[in-house]
Structure formats: structure tokens, C-alpha cells
Image: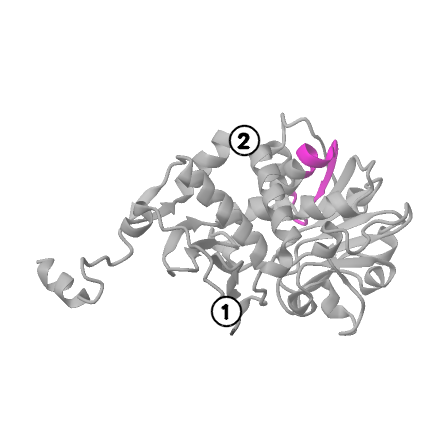
Amino acid sequence: MTAPTSVTLPAPVTPPEPSELAYVPFVSVHDMMALVRSRGIERTIAALADRIEDCFRRWPDFHRVARVPSHSRDGVIELMPTSDGDHYGFKYVNGHPANMARGYQTVTAFGVLARVDTGYPVLLSEMTVLTALRTAATSVVAAKHLAPKDATVMGMIGAGAQCEFQALGFHHVLGIREIRLHDVDPAATAKAARNLQGTGLRVVECATPEDAVAGAQIVTTCTADKRNATVLSDNMVGAGVHLNAIGGDCPGKTELARDILLRADIFVEHPEQTRVEGEIQQLDPDHPVTELWRVVTGQAPGRTGRDQITLFDSVGFAVEDFAALTWVHDAVRDGAAHERLDLLADPDDPRDLFGMLMRSG
């Protein structure tokens, strides 16, 4: 008697919601601000940190590819795609430092989330505000595993658009009580100090980067100038400090002196991308680094000693944007404000797109 042939059936697919076929939810800047204000900035960052950490725990499930950049003399435009097999997401983002002088944002972004089984988009969202929130949330996730547990003071060099989000995330989630701020533009430092009034943080405006890092257990660098710079010199970083370097995002842009990297244990998101765009572009291609997801899952150690210098060399990665988009998608399904975009052609007969067009008149 012949044994029955084993047949592998396809996994069941959850049918799309009727609304997912009729229209695509669009979360505008106005809607995003309303969503964040309704939840609270600090709680939003904490929620995004939880979602990002969850995605790091299932990192191998994701299709991981370095972002696709288009560089010009004025800046860069990038696409950041990924998929976990159920959903596909991408972010369009630019980086144009000279925009500040024109009165424009240096970074703007939007993102799309789609179902893998149908290819239909289920969300279009602004991501200028959302990227600032998810960047702070990613920093929080890294510091949770790498920073000294008793850290209460953070030095921050760079008081641009990211500054306040980082400060509030570290304050709310990790218990930072004092922020020491420095920017080459004193007006930016004063802006950040004003915005952080009444948050429970003690804010110290510092005239020099040396003053900003004095007594800090965590140091965050988030400058915008796209060139090799020495925001932190080697003698400014003592034993036991956690460095949160988030300004690097393109070839030729760095913030830390090379000697600091040689003294630190380095943690990254996606090595293939970070070696091109991060602080470690200054090092040999085979210099050892640890992927952060391995620390989150317990496969690699994070902070192992009080005098250890840890460096999170963050350039931003698509999985973090994917996590943020799924959080927004869940919020929309729970009733968060959004617009309905007539983005998808939906003829009665899928084969008769021409007929739909002709009957539309």
C-alpha cells in the first residue's frame, strides 16, 4: 500500500477589511499631532519603544536591506524598505542640511504600510514627526540594554529637531533627571531649554561641549552637518559612559573622534548599512561590532562592567520605521483621526479597468 503523499497547505490568510479595499487611510501631519497629543509625547515614545523592541526580538523574520540613497550636492533622498512576511513597509526620507537657511526642515518623511498577500497598501502616513518619535524610542531601547542602570544625567550635543524627543524619552522611560545641552547655535540651545520647561527635567544650557558632557553617564550626539566632524574628542569620554551617536546617517558624516571608537564596545542596527553611514565608517571593515537585536534577545551581552564604554552607533533602520507604521495603523483601526484616500482603482470586474474608466464619465 502506497503511503499518502504529504501536502503542505498554504497558511490561512486573514481577508482584508472592506475598508482596506475601498480606501487607504492617510494620517496627515495634523492627524499625527492630534494622535500624539492625545496619548502624550512621553507615553507615545514609550509605546513605540515597546513596539520597536518587539520587532528586534523577531529580527530574523524581517527582510533586511540597507536603505537606497540618491545623493546630490544638496543632500540625500532615501528609501527604507522592509517586510516581516505579513506586511511590507517603506519610508521616503530626505536629509538636506542647507534647508535650515531656507526656512525648511532638514529632514522630512512619509511612509507606506501594505499587506504582503494582496499588495494593497493599508496606510499612508506622514513620518516627519513620527521619525523623530521613533528615533527617540530606538535610542531608549538601546540605552535600556547598554547604559549604566543608575544613570541620571545626559549630555546632549545638538539641539535641533530631535533634541526634545530624546530628552523626554530618556526622562520618562529611563529616569534621566538632568539634561545638559549644547549647540553651536546658542539660539537652538535656548529653544530646546524653553520647550523642556515644566517637563520635570533639570535643563542646563552649556556654552561648550565639554561642559555638556561633564558628569553625564549618557552622552547623545545629534548634529545635522553632513561632514566629518569631531563633536566629541577622545579626552571628553571617560570610563563607564554610554554614547548614543544618532547624527550619522550618510557616508562622510561622523561625530566622534576615531580613538573613542577604539575604546568602546560598539552596537549597531544593521552592520552593512552602519559601516557605510555610521561612526564605524572610520574603522577597518572587519572591526567587531554587535547587532543590537542580539542583545535584546539575550544572544549577546550588552553592558558587562561599570567602566565599560558602550556606543550605540545608530543610523536609523527600516525595521524601526516598520514598527512605528504598525503602531500608527493599529491606532487608526482603533479610531484615531485620519483621512480616506481614493488611491486604489477598484473595478467591479478586476479585468475591466478600461471599462471602469469609460463608465466614469
Please provide percent x and percent y for residue 3.
53, 71
**Magenta segment includes 178:** yes
| SS under mark 1 | loop
Which residues fall within the magenta stretch?
170-186
Label 1 vs 2, first from the N-terminus: 1
Q: Amino acid at mark 1?
A: Pro
Q: Residues within 10 Å of mark 1 (few under 14, many from 20)?
A: few
Q: Where does the C terminus fall, quadrant-wise?
A: bottom left
Query: What residue do we see at 27% from left, 49% from top?
Result: 22
Please provide percent x and percent y for residue 170.
69, 38
Q: Amino acid at mark 2?
A: Gly
Query: What residue do we see at 38% from left, 55% from top?
Result: 121
Mark 1 vs mark 2, foreground winner is 1
- What numbered label is drawn on residue 4? 1
Q: Quadrant of residue 112?
A: bottom left
Which residue matches tag 2? 40
